[in-house]
Image: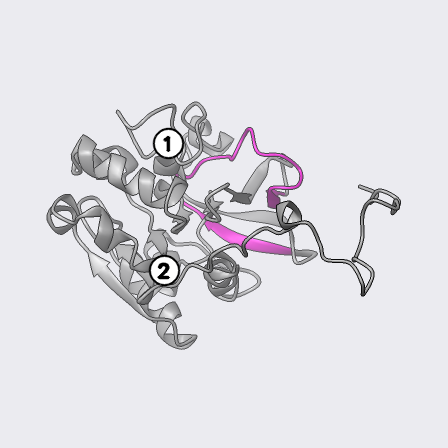
């Protein structure tokens, strides 16, 4: 989008002029936090999912806490604001949502859309972030619940899938029953499923300053998942993508 041409009424005042007070705006407040991330490790989290995220955060020197469902249900809104971003691992989104009270889901929503805490979600974490309201999920993005990537309807439970566009590269990522991120714009799309060209990783900017970064596949997946599922990753581990997602969530 082109910038408008300067006009005599817009610009810096001449040295002899005092700018009208009505043109001065206070600087935007810079949000600060006590720890970089709060990682969900409650009901229905995939085995090893939170641990994989912890290992990645340790490798890049980011600070974090883990929280289970019961502790999250008793966590006040003020404590949620102490973190730079939520990180929500894979698992079973319906059971995750059901393990939290409606009031807790409302507080999580408010921490993001009102208080500016970012949110990074993988697979189930993407499903739970997008919903029409907090009767299910968090409705961080107010849209219908995300549909599964087409492999789910073909009876495939897990596969290595091609993903294009992440930093201009093509990658093979582990998909394990995750969504396609329909409804996100070209500007929000960071990577697409290679086969269908549907969004696979997205980043949305909210008016609160929060970023909602979602992935249908699992760039954070540990090697043990590939072994468990009998899958071969032709281009090796992909855990360089996840820390960049975390860092994006914390950027101003």
Mark nearer the viewer, 1 or 2: 1
Where is residue 14? Give x, y as percent: 83, 60
Seen at 26% across and 35% down, the residue is 106
What segment is highlighted magenta in the picture?
170-193
Name the image quarter holding the N terminus. Answer: top right
Any part of residue 191 in sight: no
Seen at 45% across and 25% down, the residue is 143
The residue at which mark 1 appears reads as 139
Where is residue 168? Give x, y as percent: 70, 56
Q: Residues within 10 Å of mark 2 (few under 14, many from 20)?
A: few
Where is residue 132? Give x, y as percent: 38, 23
Where is residue 35? Give x, y as percent: 32, 66
Instruction: Report the Cα–Cα distance between label 1 and label 2.
Output: 34 Å
The residue at which mark 2 appears reads as 227
Residue placed most toward the observer, 163 or 136: 136
The number of callouts visible is 2
Q: Quadrant of residue 51?
A: bottom left
- 176 left or right, relative to 201: left
User: Is tag 1's residue or tag 2's residue first in the polypeptide sequence?
Assistant: 1
SS state under label 1: loop
Seen at 32% across and 35% down, the residue is 138
Residue placed most toward the observer, 51 or 251: 251
For the view shown, which residue lies furthest in the front direction? 16
Seen at 83% across and 44% down, the residue is 9
- 65 left or right, relative to 167: left
Residue placed most toward the observer, 233 or 115: 115
């Amino acid at each position: 989008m082109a910038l408008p041409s300067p006009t005599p009424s817009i610009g810096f005042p001449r040295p002899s002029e005092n700018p009208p007070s009505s043109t001065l705006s206070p600087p935007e407040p810079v949000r600060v936090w006590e720890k970089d991330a709060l990682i969900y490790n409650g009901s229905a989290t995939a085995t090893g999912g939170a641990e994989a995220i912890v290992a990645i955060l340790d490798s890049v020197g980011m600070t974090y806490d883990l929280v289970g469902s019961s502790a999250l249900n008793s966590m006040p809104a003020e404590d949620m604001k102490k973190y730079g971003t939520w990180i929500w691992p894979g698992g079973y989104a319906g059971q995750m949502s059901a393990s939290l009270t409606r009031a807790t889901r409302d507080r999580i929503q408010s921490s993001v859309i009102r208080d500016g805490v970012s949110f990074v979600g993988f697979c189930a974490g993407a499903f739970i972030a997008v919903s029409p309201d907090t009767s299910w999920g968090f409705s961080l993005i107010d849209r219908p619940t995300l549909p599964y990537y087409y492999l789910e309807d073909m009876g495939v439970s897990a596969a290595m899938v091609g993903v294009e566009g992440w930093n201009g590269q093509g990658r093979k990522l582990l998909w394990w029953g995750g969504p396609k991120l329909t409804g996100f714009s070209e500007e929000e799309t960071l990577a697409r499923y290679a086969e269908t060209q549907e969004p696979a990783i997205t980043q949305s900017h909210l008016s609160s300053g929060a970023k909602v970064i979602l992935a249908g596949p699992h760039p954070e997946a540990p090697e043990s998942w590939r072994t468990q599922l009998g899958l071969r990753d032709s281009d090796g581990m992909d855990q360089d993508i996840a820390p960049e997602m975390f860092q994006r969530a914390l950027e101003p």
